[in-house]
Amino acid sequence: MEDAAAVGDRVWLRLRGTGTHDGPFMGLPGTGRPIDITVIDVVRVVDGRLVEHWGVADRFSVAQQIGLVPGGPR
């Protein structure tokens, strides 16, 4: 977790994950390339329980990193 903020019943999180592309992603077989992904999550909490969740992962960046679309590392 890189950042977190809470206002009322909502919590915003910025998460980062790293790994290796070793399995299929959007039809492309594993490349062995490293990946680094950022995810933004927003959750709503009621009485200490998570009742709603919205998440956005930067899949376009991953597609660039593994060579699926132009613009990634060479």
Image (cartoon, helix red, strand yellow):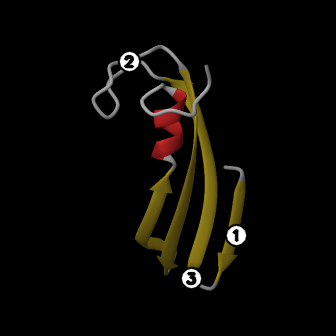
**Of residues 11 and 35, which is closer to you in this image?**
35
Q: Crowdedness of circle 2 by 10 Å Cα count: few (<14), some, many (20+)?
A: few
| Quarter occupied by the C terminus | top right
At a point 66% along the width and 49% down the height, the residue shown is 1
| Amino acid found under the numbered disc labelled 2 | Gly
Alpha-carbon span between mark 2 and mark 1 = 35 Å
Q: Residue furthest top?
A: 32
Q: Are marks 2 and 1 in contact (CB under 8 Å)?
A: no
Residue 68: % across, % down: 42, 29
Helix, strand or loop at label 1? It is: strand
Is residue 53 placed above or below 60 in the rendered structure? below
Q: Pointer 1: what residue?
A: 5
At a point 61% along the width and 50% down the height, the residue shown is 15
Is residue 4 placed above or below 22 in the rendered structure? below
Q: Nearer the viewer, mark 2 or mark 3?
A: 2
Alpha-carbon span between mark 3 and mark 1 = 11 Å
